[in-house]
Image (cartoon, helix red, strand yellow):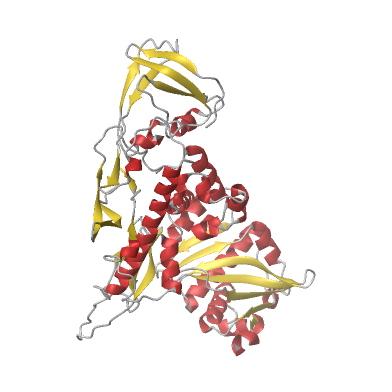
Amino acid sequence: MHKVWPTQNIAIFGKYLTASEIQYYLEFQEYPNTSETGFASVYNVLGWKQSEAREAFSMTNIQYSYGGTGTTCKVGNCDFFPGIKVSKEQRQCLSVKVCEFASKELDTGHTSVDFTQPIFKNMFDANEKFHEKATICIFAKAHKYSCGYINENGVKYNGKPKLGELVQVNNTKKKFIGCTKWKPKEKNYQFLTILPNVDLELLEMMFNEHSYHPHGIDFENDEVNTVDECFMVRPNIARSDECPFLHKIGNHIVKGVISKKASKHNHSPPPPRKTPYNIRNQLQKIINSEHILDLTRRKFLTGTMIQTYLNGKMLSDLHPSLNNQSKIDYFIEKSQRSQYPFSQNVLGVVHKFMKYNMSADPYIRSIRFLDNGQYIILCATKEQTIALSELTHIEIDMAFKRIHGITNEWEVTAYLPRVQKTLTFARIFTNIETAEAYQNLFEDLFGCIERDIGKTFNFHHIHGEGLGCIIADQHKGQALGLGQYLNSKYPHLTPIEHLQHIYKLCQVHYKW
């Protein structure tokens, strides 16, 4: 809370809108103080852009009415802001949902919120245990109900559950629990959707490091798992109506029902669901500065920038809503959708190509789709292609598999004695490996070089200078494709004769 002016008394905003107390703040109060005689919170937005100020200080950020709606009307002749157009947006507290066996400490009214109070620690601990228990339960459920898939021959597979990852239509990834025996194009395997209340990191650790024992803890009847006082508090919009904890009532162990708190004012504050704008905005900036393509929550939280920003603190110390770390997944996906609206597949590359094609030195030089289903994507800067035109030898080889699916990456490299390093001068991505496909690949590569240097690319066995050797592996399609390309340019030699002059087989590749 940042107060910059002392408290004032009696503020008149309209004929029927007054406050007996007013305080000034620099940051939005997600739990604004309340009073039966009216409490006004005034914010200093000097220096803010109007759009950012509207978002940061929006009434939708108030935790009491999160997920609800409000009404807006104009206020005429506002005494507090004379000469300024004023509107009134009215919202009401949506109350909370608590367990029928909730602690009496939750049955109390409040006019302000202080997260350092013990009651909030109890609420946050209950919420953390709730996520942990939900994770353990889905892990047990996945093993308890084994996959019963039976193939067309009547054979039951008896597959074990495993944690999988589904790439959705918008190219975002979503975890699910599937079967170890699953095969493409076969249906009716076990498939469990993972709900938002599950801790994905804990679930992944359990699948990787733990085994399931069917005679372990009985969550339905184990007295050890009962709670003496229930501090489970859910927002009013929560769908679950069952308390995740067990309660000992007399000689019985029962589950509680979560229902809306009937009293209008006598309830604890709702748990913080929405992360404040300033914290959310700062986290988004750090995420955007990372290599967003393959960024995961774990990579982000262990990164140097976020660790520097936290300065030894926990993420939840920034704001209690970040106890649920799935919010970080949402922020990452939001940045990925913003930077790569057409996802990270070929269409995404086409979008990038069209976006930067008119720049002074684009990296994606050409994209070609052919009738046979082949696509070729050539990536190189102009400086790289000019340097490549001056080489006497190059090596072309398939790079280490970094791309999912049928697309393969080819690197055009050369060892430079003056720097004693092998440098990459171009990358080519394609999906077909036939002689014709390689011929198309070489057409795009040498055609791009000729456009950049403004003259014909020289081959030593044709022009007496220029490129004299192309080192490659034993792939027949690659060699024949190069020969066919050279024959199409210089038909006085056959494809094989061209290869005898320029193509060299790499013995290291051959031995491996």
Residue 387 image-quadrant placement: bottom right
Residue 224 image-quadrant placement: bottom left
Q: Residue at x 24, y 77 (%)?
A: 148
Q: Is 199 above or below relative to 58?
A: below
Counting labels gives: 0
Most extreme residue toward the front, as rendered? 250
Q: Is 505 above or below relative to 441?
A: below
Q: Which of 291/27 is in front?
A: 27
Q: Is residue 166 left or right of residue 250?
A: right
Residue 189 coordinates in the image, percent (x, y): 27, 73
Q: Which of 407/173 is in front?
A: 173
Q: Is residue 199 left or right of residue 151?
A: right
Residue 146 coordinates in the image, percent (x, y): 27, 76
Where the C terminus falls, by quadrant? bottom right
Q: Is 317 above or below relative to 201?
A: above
Q: Residue at x 78, y 68 (%)?
A: 419
Residue 442 coordinates in the image, percent (x, y): 56, 71
Q: Is residue 237 at least partly visible in the picture? A: no
Residue 390 coordinates in the image, percent (x, y): 72, 67
Q: Is residue 246 at least partly visible in the picture? A: yes
Q: Residue at x 45, y 73 (%)?
A: 208
Most extreme residue toward the right, as rendered? 418
Q: Is 353 above or below relative to 439?
A: above
